[in-house]
Image (cartoon, rainbow, N blue to C red):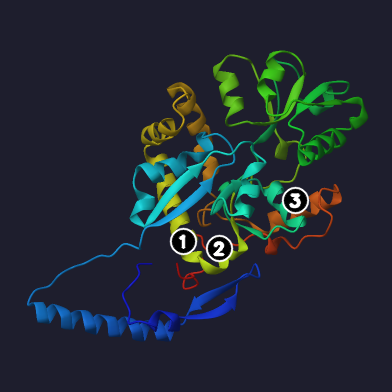
């Protein structure tokens, strides 16, 4: 929605405070007041044109607003929409000067966001639910990756079928919820979880497999490490966790502080709209998306970038008839309940309080908060 110039004090009258579905207070536009003020603005503009003796079409852009976005990890194919939106000027067109921050490790984004070191963060649905369970006032405002990417992976044709992993050594990143994934997968396949040795290899999942330190790993992404292993002819076997017994969830989500959602929802809406256009541009012209990504990640080879982007682009869009960034309420609740049953959360969760679709393209129109 384009801003219009209104007399001092008039903009405040455009809004009335309401509670969004997530419980966060936002200010909705008053339709009648909006219409009246728009008419008044049009009359004033017509008078100005008459006085000048000529028509002047002036399109205003929102005042530049710096937005610090902390990524979940190093730049990779999951971020192709972000970097394409930046390269094509989509963020700039809506008045956003976006600064991307690379985190020290994947657990850092939400901490940085909470401390005020970032305005938005890309993180993981389970990480967000755990942070909220500990009292963090954070909210997911949209999905980046619409399905699980975390996978059980082996190399050199070693078995990845959970039924064949009894007695194996499995490398993990040491994240409690991923350990719970592994237990769920093994139990669902009738394997005694105590027979499998978990080895915390941090984020060196691929080196741990290639050095034969472990028989398989759980934690790497099928669309990134899995693709790169295939390109490297390492003969990987890959099983995404949602195909092995873990409930589906949104792997990557865009997170904001509750305060930002309440006070600066217009910025969030503009950001997601620009991200949608950038992601669609990458889908329409993958070569341009690859160039944008490699500017941010120059060490990423063109071959790897092309293959991982091709694997990733379908995951960045929701099912038909759903808005870009859609978060499915029933899926969030099922996954939150699973986390609670596995003692990853101390308290029961009403997942509707953990996310909002309010600011997605075509959703919650008329509910933007002022910048």
Q: Mark 2 and mark 3: span between their CA atoms?
A: 20 Å
Tell whether label 1 touches label 2 (CB within 8 Å).
Answer: yes
Q: Secondary structure at mark 1?
A: helix
In this rendering, the answer to whether 367 lies above or below 147 is below
Mark number for residue 267? 1
Q: Position of residue 355 (x, y in %)?
A: 64, 60
Mark number for residue 153? none
Is residue 155 in sight in this rendering? no
Residue at 74% x, 59% y is: 135
Q: Which residue is mark 3?
A: 130
Q: Which residue is mark 2?
A: 260
- Horizontal side, residue 178 vs residue 357: left or right: right
Q: Quadrant of the N terminus?
A: bottom left
Q: Quadrant of the C terminus?
A: bottom left
How many discs appear? 3
Q: Earlier along the polypeptide chain: callout 1 or callout 3?
A: 3
């Amino acid at each position: 929605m384009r801003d219009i110039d209104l007399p001092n004090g008039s903009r405040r009258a455009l809004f009335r405070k309401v509670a969004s579905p997530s419980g966060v207070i936002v200010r909705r536009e008053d339709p009648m007041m909006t219409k009246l003020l728009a008419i008044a603005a049009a009359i004033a503009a017509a008078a100005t044109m008459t006085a000048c003796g000529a028509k002047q079409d002036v399109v205003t852009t929102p005042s530049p607003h710096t937005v610090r976005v902390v990524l979940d990890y190093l730049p990779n194919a999951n971020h192709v929409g972000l970097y394409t939106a930046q390269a094509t000027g989509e963020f700039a067109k809506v008045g956003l000067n976006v600064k991307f921050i690379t985190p020290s490790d994947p657990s850092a984004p939400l901490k940085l966001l909470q401390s005020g070191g970032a305005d938005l963060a890309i993180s993981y649905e389970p990480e967000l639910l755990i942070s909220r369970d500990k009292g963090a006032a954070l909210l997911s405002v949209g999905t980046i990756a619409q399905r699980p990417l975390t996978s059980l992976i082996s190399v050199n044709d070693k078995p990845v079928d959970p039924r064949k992993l009894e007695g194996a050594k499995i490398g993990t990143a040491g994240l409690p919820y991923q350990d719970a994934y592994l237990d769920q997968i093994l139990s669902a396949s009738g394997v005694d979880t105590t027979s499998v040795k978990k080895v915390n290899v941090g984020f060196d999942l691929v080196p741990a497999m290639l050095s034969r330190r472990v028989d398989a790993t759980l934690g790497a992404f099928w669309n990134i490490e899995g693709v790169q292993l295939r390109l490297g002819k390492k003969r990987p076997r890959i099983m995404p966790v949602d195909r092995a017994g873990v409930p589906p969830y949104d792997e990557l989500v865009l997170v904001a502080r509750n305060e930002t959602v309440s006070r600066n929802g217009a910025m969030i809406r503009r950001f997601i709209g620009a991200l949608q256009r950038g992601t669609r541009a990458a889908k329409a012209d993958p070569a341009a998306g690859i160039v944008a990504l490699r500017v941010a990640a120059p060490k990423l080879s063109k071959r790897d970038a092309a293959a991982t982007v091709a694997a990733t682009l379908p995951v960045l869009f929701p099912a038909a008839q759903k808005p870009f960034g859609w978060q499915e309420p029933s899926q969030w609740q099922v996954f939150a309940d699973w986390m609670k049953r596995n003692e990853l959360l101390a308290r029961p969760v009403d997942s509707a309080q953990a996310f909002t679709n309010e600011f997605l393209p075509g959703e919650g129109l008329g509910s933007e908060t002022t910048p």
